């Protein structure tokens, strides 16, 4: 039986986040902003899950669990408020407004394209 270390899991989740971001940009370039927004949200969620696993040694779970854990990291000073704000902005605007209701706005593309910076910041906080 093969066991996977926590660090291997963290690396795998960050790699998945990067793949999702690449797909988001690809969908954006094909003028499918709603799918691009959802893929960018997924990339944000996965990067946050990896950060939680790296710092809290907790298995990433549903969005509610991820949100609660990120809130705890910020409250403990282990993650900056700015990361938390960017996470919730993406949850609300990319996942909720744009993907689900089609209410994409002039900031949607910027949020999608800036997801790579979010991933990089989460990786840095995780010690990647």
Image (cartoon, rainbow, N blue to C red):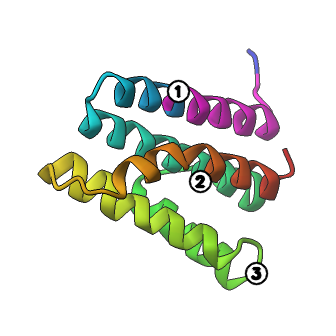
| Front one among 60 and 51 | 51
Give the mark, 1 or 3, whose residue is nearer the N terminus: 1
In this rendering, position of residue 55 left or right of residue 118: right
Compared with residue 18, is residue 84 higher up or lower down, i.e. above or below?
A: below
| Residue 100, position as x, y percentages in the image | 17, 49
Mark 2 closeness class: few <14, some 14–19, many ≥20 residues within 10 Å: many
Provide the secondary structure element on which disc 1 rests: helix
Provide the secondary structure element on which disc 2 rests: helix
Q: Quadrant of the C terminus?
A: top right
Query: Distance between the Cα atoms at labels 1 and 2?
Result: 17 Å
The residue carrying mark 2 is 48
In this rendering, position of residue 104 left or right of residue 87: left
Q: Residue furthest front?
A: 106
Compared with residue 52, is residue 5 higher up or lower down, i.e. above or below?
A: above
In magenta segment, residue 80: no
Query: Distance between the Cα atoms at labels 1 and 3?
Result: 30 Å
The residue carrying mark 3 is 77
Q: Nearer the viewer, mark 1 or mark 3?
A: 1
| Residue 76, position as x, y percentages in the image | 73, 82
- Disc sitting over residue 22 in the figure: 1
């Amino acid at each position: 039986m093969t066991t996977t270390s926590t660090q291997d899991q963290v690396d795998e989740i960050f790699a998945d986040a990067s793949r999702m971001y690449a797909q988001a940009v690809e969908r954006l370039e094909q003028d499918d902003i709603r799918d691009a927004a959802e893929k960018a949200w997924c990339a944000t969620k996965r990067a946050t899950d990896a950060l939680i696993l790296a710092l809290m040694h907790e298995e990433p779970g549903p969005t509610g669990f991820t949100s609660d854990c990120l809130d705890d990291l910020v409250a403990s000073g282990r993650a900056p408020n700015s990361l938390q704000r960017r996470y919730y902005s993406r949850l609300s605007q990319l996942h909720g407004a744009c993907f689900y209701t089609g209410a994409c706005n002039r900031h949607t593309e910027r949020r999608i394209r800036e997801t790579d910076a979010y991933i990089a910041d989460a990786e840095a906080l995780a010690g990647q």
